[in-house]
Image (cartoon, rainbow, N blue to C red):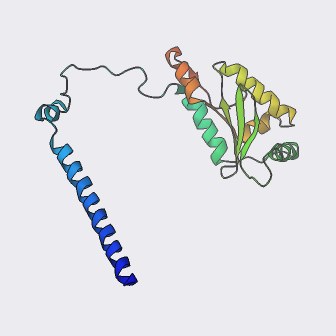
Amino acid sequence: MKRRKEDIVIVILGLVLVIIMFTILFLSFTTKQNVPVQQLTQRSLPTATATPTTPSRSVGPPLAYDVTASQKLLDYFNNRRTLSSQDIAAKTTILSLLPSGEKSGVVYQTADFKIEYIHSADMFLIEILTPNIQMAKNEAETWLKEQGVSQRGICILPVEFYMNYNIANQLRQQNIIFSPLPDGC
């Protein structure tokens, strides 16, 4: 008798759940179908305008790069010169500034520039973070020389300068031709 009461309670509970589910489904279908036709037609796609537009000045690169300097940098990269023992020692000192266990990464940074070593390319990239390009290049080269790198070493490591994109955009209207080479290379 006790078992029979439990079965009846389970069956009744199941029926109540089924009724609740059907009620929820019924209500959800009826509310979706009651959307007025006017609302559906108001959601049409916007029509294209026939007004011609002119391209903005932001199309294309923000700065022009000095082609001759870029070719010379590529030559330094493709035809590696032998570093002096002083420059090798200075490079080793600089690379010791990398985070422990890392082969690539930022070795030095200020508000005006960031020096990063790229192990796979065996080169230093210096990002200019200020609109005062020449000042940042001078400061970065001075820092490298303070680490013991000679002027010749700065050229043949190689070291490449590049502009931060946001800073380059700020300088877009000034028709600057940017050299990726350090001065004196």
Residue 53 x, y percent position in the rendering: 27, 20
Residue 77: quadrant of the picture: top right
Q: Residue furthest top?
A: 174
Which image quarter holds the N terminus?
A: bottom left
**In this picture, is 145 found above or below 20?**
above
Residue 168 position, x and y percent, is 56, 24
Residue at 73% x, 28% y: name it.
Answer: 184
Q: Where does the C terminus fall, quadrant-wise?
A: top right
| Residue 146 shown left or right of residue 12 in the figure | right
Percent x, y of residue 10: 35, 73
Q: Nearer the viewer, residue 146 or 55?
A: 55
Q: Which of the 4 quarters of the picture holds residue 163?
A: top right
Identify the residue shown where x is 21% and y is 19%. 51
Indicate the quadrant where residue 114 lies.
top right
| Number of numbered discs on residues | 0
Residue at x 82% of width, y 42% of height: 94
For this rendering, which residue is in front, 3 or 102?
3
Residue sitting nearer the eye, 69 or 15: 15
Residue pictured at 29% horizontal, 63% vertical: 16
In-image side of 173 versus 81 (left or right): left
- Residue 58 percent across, percent down from the top left: 43, 23
Viewed as shown, does residue 83 lie left or right of 164? right
